[in-house]
Image: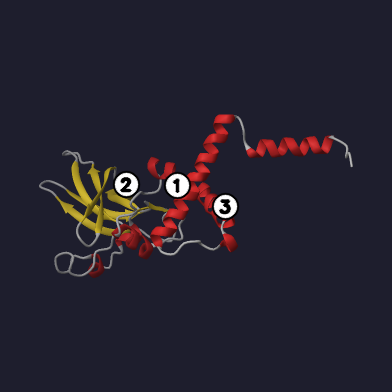
């Protein structure tokens, strides 16, 4: 399971979620500036990687002496786990006149001292990876498809709150509370599916509008 949220979640929140093996879908914070990541040295070429808008870019020099950042295609989102934590990677395809290169770049989790060679961890280099690189970057088809469900999710949890006594969770512990939420959502989906099978053209909005119009036309019989 994962988290669907807006831009309020920052790197410190992403890091915790990603380390636990969960997927986070949210917007990149607008105040995040491009940051240098690393330079890849191959036999006949070099590629300078930067973070921008939640994903890895390559710095490209232009004919007029300026430069620009070009987003690199993500072929795969990869998750690896050990006994203590999870790590997430983007398998990138780096275009090159001498032939494309494959590169695996860590995302979502900021490495700490001791996790890599001395001086190479994100903490030592000052690069907060979870703040600058999303698991599912903005402006991708996958992000646009999944993020569109955020408003429906908020509406669903609002209905859940109203269904509970005094708007208080009726169970103790994360597992029990998850069961309550899942049970409520399953019931909502089952109700919606049954209503759709009865009348595929039915919507609450149309029904309420029709009832209101009819009541306005008909005189009171009291």
Q: Quadrant of residue 140?
A: top left
User: Alpha-carbon distance for marks 1 and 2?
Assistant: 23 Å
Q: Is residue 5 visible?
A: no
Q: Quadrant of the C terminus?
A: top right
Task: Please give the residue where the numbered disc 2 appears in the rendered image.
Answer: 70
Compare marks 3 and 2 and give the one earlier in the sequence: 2
Q: Nearer the viewer, mark 1 or mark 2?
A: 1
For label 3, the crowd category at 10 Å Cα-Cα, with few meaning under 14, some 14 to 19 and many 20 or more, is some
In-image side of 147 versus 43 (left or right): right
Q: Quadrant of residue 16?
A: bottom left
Q: Which mark is residue 35?
A: none
Q: Name which residue lies at 39% across and 59% down.
A: 175
Residue 134 percent coordinates (x, y): 34, 53
Q: How many marks?
A: 3
Task: Please give the residue where the numbered disc 3 appears in the rendered image.
Answer: 159
Q: Is residue 106 visible?
A: yes
């Amino acid at each position: 399971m994962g988290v669907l949220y807006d831009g309020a979640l920052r790197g410190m929140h992403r890091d915790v979620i990603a380390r636990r093996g969960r997927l986070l879908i949210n917007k990149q914070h607008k105040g995040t500036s491009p940051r240098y990541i690393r330079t890849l040295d191959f036999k006949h070429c070099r590629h300078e990687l930067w973070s921008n808008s939640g994903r890895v870019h390559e710095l490209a020099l232009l004919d007029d002496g300026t430069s620009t950042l070009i987003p690199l295609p993500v072929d795969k989102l990869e998750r690896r786990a050990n006994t203590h934590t999870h790590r997430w990677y983007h398998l990138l395809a780096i275009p090159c006149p001498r032939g494309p290169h494959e590169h695996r770049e860590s995302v979502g989790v900021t490495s700490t001292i001791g996790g890599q060679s001395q001086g190479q961890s994100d903490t030592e280099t000052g690069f907060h990876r979870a703040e600058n690189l999303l698991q599912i970057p903005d402006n991708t088809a996958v992000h646009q498809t999944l993020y569109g469900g955020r408003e429906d999710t908020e509406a669903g949890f609002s209905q859940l709150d109203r269904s509970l006594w005094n708007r208080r969770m009726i169970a103790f512990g994360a597992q029990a509370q998850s069961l309550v939420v899942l049970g409520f959502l399953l019931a909502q989906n089952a109700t919606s599916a049954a209503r759709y099978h009865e009348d595929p053209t039915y919507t609450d909005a149309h029904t309420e509008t029709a009832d209101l119009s009819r009541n306005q036309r008909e005189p009171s019989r009291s």
